Amino acid sequence: MNLEFQRMTYMTIALVAGFVLDLIFGDPRWLYHPVRLIGHLISGTERIIRNCLPANKTGERIGGGILVLVVVTVSTGVPAVILSVAYKYFWQLGLALESFWCYQMLATKSLKVESDRVYIALKNKCLEAGRKAVSMIVGRDVARLDARGVMRAAVETVAENTSDGVIAPMLFLAIGGAPLGFFYKAVNTMDSMLGYVEPPYKDIGLVPARMDDVFNFIPARLSALLMLAAGALLQLDVKNGWKIFRRDRCKHASPNSAQTESVCAGLLGLRLAGDAWYHGVLHKKDYIGDAKREIELEDIPRAGRLMYLTAVLALVVFGVGKALLIVL
């Protein structure tokens, strides 16, 4: 069997197996996640850079570029070497390991589980528990949120993370297997940890944030189109989803974050986003979508179902595309 053909076949099998494992097991808290290792690498590299370079705008921006090179190289290179050795001497081990890593790169079930915790807390009329649950999946301050604010935050994060938590890593896994999946996770984790506009991350986080914008550009838009297709299958308001997507997809500081959020808002007939508090600072934000109705508790599981079906459609599209490349 041609080595390139063989590698592409293994990558496709690993992706499908990883997706199935994710749907079954999610992200159990007892299982050590490789993203935590990437996080430790980012923190350690940041400390070294801050100690070695001047603490000014230029020094920190150069340091941010160096940090990206180090983290991406290590995060991608180490899994690539391990898989290469495994496949060379015992292909079954290589396939099993790549399948396991593909599973760990995806967050389909964990996103649904975490949003369901918000749903259950609010259904039991416990606002404080709802705030605590939603704080696990959003970066904003939650203490000021009322019940509808908690619902809105949960729906928004499911919609946004459909792209960078599910579809984007799936796309990178489909293209380059687990090593490219680790590449994407490294870029995404750097943005999550360093990509803030406030000190002390404003300058050192500039390059990581721009990298995340670049590598999420295509996945975010692809995710939005797949979500529209999922909305059609779920008999949601696709016409309004398309309208809000075209109108509001750029109403965010990030060029990518509002892509799927605008589709979700339109499909569900909700007004999402708006002003939010982060680290005690009020950030003024545009609204996304029109308030055809008030948000309700059932919108959280609706967003979850939309995310699940979008993920399944993505797997089918990427899987078929990969299969065609293998055959041709």
Image (spheres, rainbow, N blue to C red):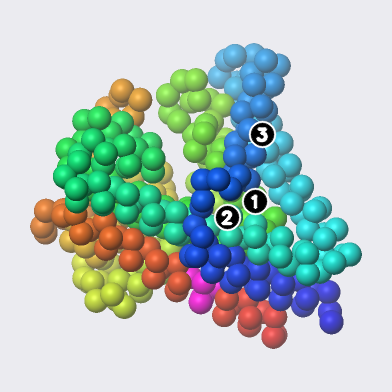
Q: Are marks 3 and 2 in contact (CB under 8 Å)?
A: no
Specify the amino acid type for callout 2: Met
- The residues tagged by marks 1 and 3 sit, at their Cα atoms, a distance apart of 13 Å
Give the quarter of the figure containing the N terminus.
Answer: bottom right
Q: Is residue 249 above or below residue 19?
A: above
Q: Is residue 225 left or right of residue 185?
A: left
Residue 318: % across, % down: 55, 73
Nearest the viewer among 268 and 134 is 134
Nearest the viewer among 250 and 159 is 159
Nearest the viewer among 204 and 19 is 19
Q: Is residue 125 left or right of residue 92?
A: left
Q: Which mark is residue 105?
A: 2
Judged from this view, the residue extending furthest toward the left is: 293
Q: Earlier along the polypeptide chain: callout 2 or callout 1?
A: 2
User: Residue drawn 48% across and 70% down?
Assistant: 314
Residue 152: % across, % down: 23, 47
Q: Which mark is residue 41?
A: 3
